[in-house]
Amino acid sequence: MPLRADEVDIGLQFEPTELLYRRVSKDGVNSAGEFLPSELNTISFNKHIDSAPSVLRSAYSKPLDVIASDCAGEKDVSAWRVFAIAVDDLPTPVVAQDGRSFDFYPVHRPLPRCGAHSVISCCITGDKTRIYVVPPRSIKNALRTKLATSLKPVVIG
Amino acid sequence: MPSYAVTSPQHRICIMDTLKRTASQSSTTFFRREEERAYRSRRSSQFHTNRIYVSAWIESIDDLLGLHENWNSYGAPPPEVNAVRGAKEILSAIAGCAIVPDNVRASAEGGVAIIFSGVGKNRAIVESLNNGEQYALLYDLDGRNRTIDWPSGGNERLVIEELESHLRGSLLAA
């Protein structure tokens, strides 16, 4: 059972080696088992940080939690696959064609029945206030590509 | 264990060398023409096969309109009619080319993703989104990537050539 929001410490910093989990259906990988960038939605990049790309942080979850319905909006995803990326491997910074540079970083945003829920947020590099910004299409695609090619399959045992 | 494997390119070069030394100019030309004709025939056959594959995708793509909201469990919207129409136009544009999609499926961005695998680590996705955006995302498994807007109005030739070149193994800038 995934931990609930009241069972996690929101102040716990992300360690560089901490894993971020993401699930995908069996059709969301190609014949070689590679995670497809088109499975990552960055359309949710907007002022509401909670709709940025979702992951589960390993400090408060196990791979099995990623395919639990509590962490999937009650959807049955028990047969889906789980991939992971270490915080230190997040593609950041990413430089846009116009020269602007963007940082991506995890933010812990627990949901009532999924305490490990987090999002990958985005800000202009060097912006100490880390105000959330909407990156251009080339940056969105760079993030999707780099994330997809960095996500490694997790064996659920 | 003896091996009887002979690589055909070496064999072909031997024939041409012999022809150069012993055959007349006209017979050499004849063989070249025959070789070109065979090459054109193979290409024509390949294009015909590709056209059939792509036509099958175009016919089945409307099935994506039956997807529900949150189909990927992360809140992705289903493809809309305009995105599907755009994807059909893109598929029609590549139908006569030497590339065939591996798959055509919904994009988590909200729209349709046309997925390609290329030589070595090279991959590509062409997306037609609900918001009207259309682009080719060229990438490799080392994370290098490039986004090219998909032009409208039948001017897609240059983008298709870049897509073909990438899938044949051209390197992306780091």
Image (cartoon, helix red, strand yellow):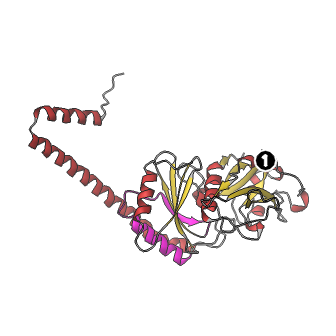
* In this view, B2 is above or below B98: above
- Residue A129: quarter of image: bottom right
* In this view, A94 is above or below B127: above
Residue range of the region highlighted in magenta in the rendering? B80-109
Q: Is residue A79 visible?
A: no
Q: Does residue B95 show up magenta in the picture?
A: yes
- Residue A124: quarter of image: bottom right
Left or right: where does residue B80 sit relative to residue A21? Answer: left
Disc 1 is placed on an element classified as loop
Q: Say which amino acid is labelled 1.
A: Glu
Q: Does residue B117 show up magenta in the picture?
A: no
| Number of marks | 1
The x and y percentages for residue B157 are 39, 64
Q: Nearer the viewer, residue B41 or B154?
A: B154
Which residue is identified by label 1?
Answer: A18
The x and y percentages for residue A108 are 82, 59
The x and y percentages for residue B166 are 46, 52
Q: Nearer the viewer, residue B126 or B155?
A: B155
**Residue drawn at 57 percent across, 72 percent down:** B79
Q: Nearer the viewer, residue B109 or A33?
A: B109
